[in-house]
Image: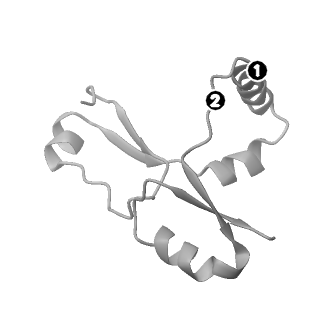
Amino acid sequence: YVANRGYVVTYGGMSRQPVTVSTAALIFKSVHVVGFWRSLWAKENSGSPEDNKMYAELEKFALEHKLRAPIHLMCPLREYQSAVKTSMKGYTSCKQILVNE
């Protein structure tokens, strides 16, 4: 549910599916749809007060053990083709991490 004049922010494309918004939401509720590209934000805001605050909060969460690594599979670099093929299937329950052994 998005309130009148609310925002829908998309920030990840892991599903490789388009974002769908009804015409009624755009016209009658004035809903705004925007994208967020973290890499670009980091480049443009490196060292800013917002950037420093974010990293301080992440550090606090890490020290409190409130951050957890996603489910992942360590894949030897020699098996990169299999890892890439798996990751290109769209949403998967496991991240493929290439490791140079």
Indicate the position of residue 3 as horizontal and vertical percent values: 27, 26
Secondary element type, mark 1 = helix
Q: Nearer the viewer, residue 21 or 5?
A: 21
Callouts 1 and 2 close, C-beta under 8 Å: no
Label disc, if present, on residue 63 of the rendered structure: 1
Indicate the position of residue 52 as horizontal and vertical percent values: 80, 29
Q: Residue furthest right?
A: 47
Q: Please state which amino acid type lies under the numbered disc 2.
A: Leu
Label disc, if present, on residue 67 of the rendered structure: 2
Secondary element type, mark 2 = loop
Determine the image quadrant of residue 58.
top right
Q: Please state which amino acid type lies under the numbered disc 1.
A: Leu
> Where does the N terminus fall, quadrant-wise?
top left
Q: Nearer the viewer, residue 10 or 14?
A: 14
> Number of callouts in the render?
2
> Where does the C terminus fall, quadrant-wise?
bottom right
